[in-house]
Amino acid sequence: MYHLNTSISYLKGVGPSRADLLKTELGIHTFGDLVNFFPNRYIDRTQFLKINQLQENTSEIQIVGKITAIKTVQQKRGSRLIATFADDTGTIELVWFRGAKWIKESLKVNISYVIFGKTNFFNRQFTMPHPEMELVSAYQKKMQISMQPVYPSTEKLTNKGVTNRVVSTMIQSLFEELKGTFKETLSSSILTKQKLIAKNEALLNIHFPKSQELLTKAQNRLKFEELFFIQLQLIRKKIVRKIKIKGFIFKKVGVNFNNFYKNKLPFDLTNAQKNVLKEIRKDIGSNAQMNRLLQGDVGSGKTIVALLTMLIALDNGYQAAFMAPTEILAIQHYNSLVELLNGMNISVKLLTGSVKAKERRILHKQLESGELNILIGTHALIEDKVKFKNLGIAIIDEQHRFGVAQRSKLWEKNKLPPHILVMTATPIPRTLAMSVYGDLDISVINELPPDRKEVKTAHRYDANRLSVFKFLKDEIAKGRQIYIVYPLINESEAMDYKDLMDGYESISREFQKPTYQISILHGKMKSADKEYEMQRFINGETQIMVATTVIEVGVNIPNASVMVIESAERFGLSQLHQLRGRVGRGAAQSFCVLMTSFKLSSDAKVRLNTMVGTSDGFKIAEVDLKLRGPGNLLGTQQSGVLDLKIADIVKDAELLKSARAIAIELLTSDPTLKAPENSLIKIAYQEVSKNSTIWSNIS
């Protein structure tokens, strides 16, 4: 008796060698894996074309005709089989590069065939390589599926003869073996409420759709199920954490917070900042550990919110840690916080890979004794030697740049885990946040300080470079400073360096000493040299900073009013937006100039037009999500987080919202899924959880 956990090698037509191919190429190990291997598109098999109707860009087509001639052409490696195929309007060549001998033996001249495949146009002749072929007599006898499923494949599978037709045949064999024994996974109340068809019917119609209407219903049912169980996992994890994981209770807002708020705050908080602070205070005043994601566009004032949160920790007798992804950013935060806290009796120290051993030893002692209040640093903070007396809160900036294991090490610094506030200046679209960060509480700072002017953005071609240089000289004459940023190319350090140095020489020729002074900053420089160059720019000793994307995040120099991004077409939208956020931090009007060649892809044009058209990071993130998909948008640390089989969080946003709402409603009324009507959901949930690739990004 076969079941869903049966090895795929036991399926008729598979065998050991094909089973190995399916495992390595598609991750299909069992009958169940194959059942849930869904088509990515469908082809209408009810339509037939005449040969004289073919066009150069036609995709898969069907033709009825006869083979009129067959020949074998010898090549350096083996032979090629060519058959002339004709209907009453013209001819087309059918070509086989493999298996010529046995295919030739199977072909019959002057017998009617139905052929199906992709056409090429070469030397004024249409060809169809490796067509699917069937005698018209056999085609008419069997029941035809109007829409033929097309399954994801790889070059290796095709080369080994595991074509789409072979996969379809395997799935047909599987359905014959299992005979509709697929267990229901949703309760009858959810099926009724969401107007979903049964699991058996959905699986049958996703692989063998009898009509477009049934296919749509099948897709809707399976998409909802996939999104529902992801949401169930995330929400249940959130509920369990709030019940099981206790946190420090920060009972009061004391001297440090009040003194800073009344006397040191550099500007009035926006309403959005005040609302976020209220949410944070509610978390840290409860008995549960805070696990909150703070989203805020560049320049929205996340750092001030983080500082005020750390001051509450200090008021309650705890220490605070602030972890940044790069040394430049850590130094920037350190300098900023030291300046803001000047005159207050608060000890703030910096820990990065560049800190000398002697200084580290002193710092470690101060940290363990409690003498040190706030520690700012890079991943050096999570080293085993770094021990706090009583770490109450950990702030993680640009958290998507840290791995799960790195972040979780902060939890191990105490008996009770500290409160966690993670921040990102990369706005996350709502659907993506629900899917990936659904187990976190999410706060959003969605307004900029009232005195902040919008950065004016322009797209200019390389041919306009002289006028751009004139504009830069005019800005420098007003006392402003300029960033000129070069891209990463193929992620090759050597090529990045060459591109940057070529640019530096070009800029140096145009902006000559002694009138102009230029700084340079790139990833190959020693930390001390980076700090030296950055400090020169901060002090106004240089007017132009030529850099790679090391300045992408967190650098805050109010007098820098122009950002020039070279080869802007090579940057992603998120990166362009982050770079633009380095200017516009002072009172002067700021500008961003996107330099490109004339040769632009359609996606590059969309990115550039989006940047020119809006400064809203959330709108930009939505466009980026549509262009790149969730995996790329999340970055390497979370690229496997959303390995969806059928749902698409962009196209299925409404379905995702419904799935989340139903999951919340279900777990609110039945947290352990013990009610009899939820027994099917509980069984499916346990199975999904066991095989899940969904990672919490903090826990």
Image (cartoon, rainbow, N blue to C red):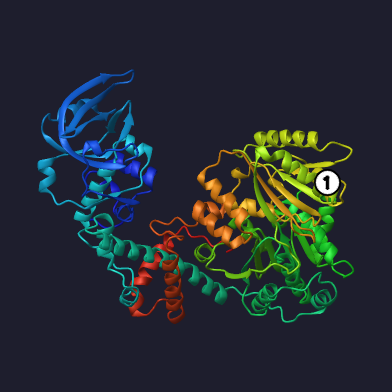
Q: Relative to residue 572, is residue 192 drawn left or right? A: left
What x and y, as percent, mark residue 145? 20, 52
Left or right of 625 on screen, residue 99: left
Measuring 73% from the left and 62% from the top, which residue is drawn there? 453
Please tell me whether residue 66 is drawn above or below residue 251 in the rendered image: above
Q: Secondary structure at mark 1?
A: loop
Return the residue at label 1: 543
- x%, y% of residue 171? 25, 51
Quarter in which the C terminus is drawn: bottom right
Q: Amino acid at mark 1?
A: Gln
The answer to whether residue 364 is seen in the rendering is no
Q: Is residue 638 above or below residue 129?
A: below
Residue drawn at 27 percent across, 39 percent down:
117
> Is 57 displayed left or right of 434 in the figure?
left
Can residue 217 be spotted in the picture? yes
Taking the spot 45% from the left edge, 55% from the top edge, the residue there is: 643
For residue 288, which quarter of the picture? Answer: bottom right
